[in-house]
Amino acid sequence: MRIDAKGLSFKELNEKVREAVKSGASEVELVNVNGQRFIGDGLTTPVTIVTRGSAGNDLGAFMSGPKILVKGNVADAAGNTMNEGAILIDGRAGDVLGHSMRGGKILIRGSVGYRAGLHMKAYKDKNPTIVVGGTAEDFLGEYQAGGTIVVLALEHDNGRAIGDYVGTGMHGGRIFVKGAVSKDQLGPGATIDEVTDADRSELKQAVEDYCRAFNVPVEQILSHMFTKIAPVSSRPFGKTYAIQSGDVPPKT
Amino acid sequence: MNPLEIPPEFHIMVDVGKCQLCGRCVQECSFGALRRTDKIEADERKCVACQRCVATCPQRAIMVVDHPLAFALHGTWTEKNRRDIWKQAETGRALLSGTGTDISYPSLFDHILIDSCQVTNPPIDPLREPMELRTYIGRRPRGLEFVEGDSGGLELKTVLPPSIELKTPIIFGAMSYGAVSLETHKALAAAAHEKGTVMNSGEGGLHAEMREYGQNIIVQVASGRFGVNMDYLKLAAAIEIKIGQGAKPGIGGHLIGEKVTEQISQTRMIPTGTDAISPAPHHDIYSIEDLSQLIYALKEATEYKKPILVKIAAVHNVAAISSGIVRAGADGIVIDGFRGGTGAAPTVIRDHHGIPIEPAIAAVDDRLREEGIRDEVSIIASGGIRCSSDVAKAIALGSDAVAIGTAALIALGCRICKQCHTGLCAWGICTQKPELRRRLDLNTATRRLCNLLDAWSIELKEILGALGMNAIESLRGNRDRLRGIGLDHTTLEVLGIKPAGR
C-alpha cells in the first residue's frame, strides 16, 4: 500500500499508516515524506514500512516488531525506546539515535549525530544493535546499559570515526569502532577492552547485517582492526552513597 | 571498642521480668539490632525506631525510647549536624535518605484556615444532601459545540479529549516497584480499583500481576524508560512523563544494583545486579519543544486514547514551566512539593532543594489563569499532603486533585523510621526481601488504604458542607475561602489569600 505524505501533518500521516496496518497491509510505502514525526511509533505488528524523503524525529519510537526502511535521511531520536524490530536508514541519522532502545537493530548507511545509543539497554534475549556505516559524533553510547554499537567509519566527515566523551556513564554493553581510539576520547565510566572471540563473532554478524542491507562487500571491512569500548563497572553508583546508619560500606 | 563509633539514637529497654526469651523480637528486627543469648541483647547503633519489636513482642516487654545520651547543647552544631559529619568522616560518601525531608521547615498548610458558613450563607449537611467529590483528570475542551440531532434534540459535536474519572480527588502518587514491595503496589492498585481512583506505577515498570488493575493505574515514563513497552503503555489509564520529583529535584533515580533482584529485573527489563540509572534529565528533552515531542510520541503510540501527564518538582520557576507544559500538549500537570517522599535520595538534595507545594499550586494556578489556559488541564498536587484538610486547602489553592504517597504508606503501618533506602523495611513496605514482604498482608493492606480514602472523603464532604458547597469543583481555586494566619504580607500575596480577619 502506498501513502502520499505530501502536505499531511504527522497526525494525519500516522493515522493513515495505522489504518493501513490494521487493514492487514504487509508493506506500506510512504512517499514525499518531509519531516513528519513519529512514523511507525508504537506499532507492534511485523509490517514493513518504506519511507521515501526525509523522515522526522522519533521514527519508530516505542515500536515492537515492524521493519522500517528509510530511503533518505532521518532526523533525531529514531528508535526511541524501541523494543523489537529493525530500522534501516539508507542515508544519515540525527542525534540521540536509539535512545533507550531495548531490542531490535538500527543500521545506518551513513553517519549519525550526537549521543547515538544513549541509555541503550539489554534484557535477557534482547540485545539491541546499532551499526553506523559512517562516523558518530560526541557522547556515543552515553549511559549505555546494554547492547552493541558498531561504528564502521566507511565514510569520514572530520577525519575520525567517533567524537569525544564516548561511553560517558556507560555501565553495560559494548562499542566497536573500526581503527584505533584514543583514551582521551573516552568519557568517565568507559574503558578500552580486549576483543574476545565472542566479540568477533558478534561483530561479524553485525557487519554482515549492515553489508547485506546496503550492498557493501563484507571482507574489506572485517579485515580492519576494531577497538572495543566497554564499561568500567556495571555499578557506577556503587561507591557514591553511605547506605545504612551504623553500617559502614566497604571501601571497594 | 572504637571511641569514634557513632553513638546510638535510640535506647532499647527489655523488661526482663516480662521477657520469656521467645526470640520473636530477634526475628522481627530486620536491622539486626537484637540478639538472644541468655537474655535479649541489643546493638542499639542499629536500632532505627521502626517499633517492629515493640509491636510484635507477645509479652509487651520491649520499649524503644530516645537515647538518653546527652549531646551538649549548642545553638549552631545540632545533634544532626554532628551525626552527619561523623558518618561522612567514616565513609567518605554522600548521605542517602528515605522518606521526605525531616527538617521542620514551616508548613504553610498549618498557617491557612478554611472559611465556614454562618447565618446568611447556610452550611449544607452532608448527611442529608448529596455531595459531589467526582473529579476528572485530563484535558478539557475550550468550549462545547452542539449540533441538532436527527431526533431534534441537541447532540455534542465537540470531541471530548480522554480523561480519567476519580470518585474522590485523591490518588496514590508514584512509588515504583523496587522502591516498594509488590504487596504494597498491589494493595495500592486494589484499593484504587475499589474506591474509584488511581495509583501510579512509578518508574520501575509493572509486575505481571498488576495488569488486571490497568484502568486504575497511571504508568510512568521516566528518563531511564525502565519497563516501558507498548503493553505497559496500552494497559494504563493514563501516562505520566516524570521530569522530576519533589524529594530530589534535578536528580535522577538510582536503584542500586543490590535491589535489582530477579523479579525487579523483569519489570524494569534490565539485567539483575546492575545499577538502574534514571539520568537527571531526559536526554531527549532539553526544551518545551522537546517535551512536546515526547508527549506526542506517547499520544501517537497510544492513539490519543489516554491523558498524558507531566510530573515536575516544585521549583522556583514552576509557574513558567507549567505554562510551557500545557502548551507542549500535556493533559495534566503533577506538581510535587519539596516535602514529597522518596525511596532513596541524597539527603542534601532532599533537605535543601525545591519549594513547598502550597505556593507552587498558587503560582501555577495564577499563571495559567492569567494566560487563559487553566481550564484546559488538570493540576495534581503532591508532596506532604498529610490529612483531608491539606487536600481541601490544596484544592482551594488551585489544584484539581492531590496525590498521596507517604500518607498511604503510613496507613499500611509505616512508622517513618526513614530507612526506605536500606531495603530492610521491617513492615514489608519498602523492601524486596521475601521474608519481610510476607509481613504485609494484602487484604489487610487494601482494606486500610480503602479506609483511609473513605475517611478523608467523608471529611472532605464535611468541609464542603461547612463551606456551603455541594461539589468539590466549587472549591477548586476558590482562595477566597481561605485565610492566612501568622503569614507575612508577601507570602499571603503569593498564596493569593487574605489574612484572617479581613
Image: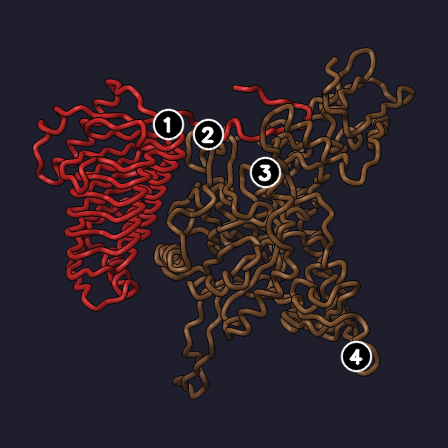
Q: Position of residue B171 (x, y in %)?
A: 60, 55
Label 4 is placed on what type of residue?
Answer: Pro
Say which residue label 3 marks.
B346
Q: Quadrant of the C terminus of chain B?
A: bottom right
Mark 3 Cα-neighbour bin, 10 Å: few <14, some 14–19, many ≥20: some
When the figure is inspected, residue B92 is found, relative to residue B188, above or below; the finding is above
Q: Does residue B194 show up? A: no
Q: Nearer the viewer, residue B385 or A137?
A: A137
- Element marked by disc 4: loop
**Chain of the residue under the numbered disc 2 shown in the image:** A
Say which residue label 4 marks.
B122
Chain given the colour red: A
Q: Position of residue B467 (x, y in %)?
A: 75, 72
Q: Residue at x 62, y 40 (%)?
A: B348
Label 1 is placed on what type of residue?
Answer: Pro
Q: Nearer the viewer, residue B293 or B262?
A: B293
Label 3 is placed on what type of residue?
Answer: Pro
Say which residue label 1 marks.
A231
Q: Position of residue B402 (x, y in %)?
A: 62, 58
Q: CA distance from mark 1 to mark 3?
A: 24 Å
Q: CA distance from mark 2 to mark 1?
A: 9 Å
Question: Mark 1 near mark 3, Cβ–Cβ under 8 Å?
Answer: no
Instruction: Kindly report which numbered mark, 1 or 4, lies closer to the viewer in this rendering.
Output: 1
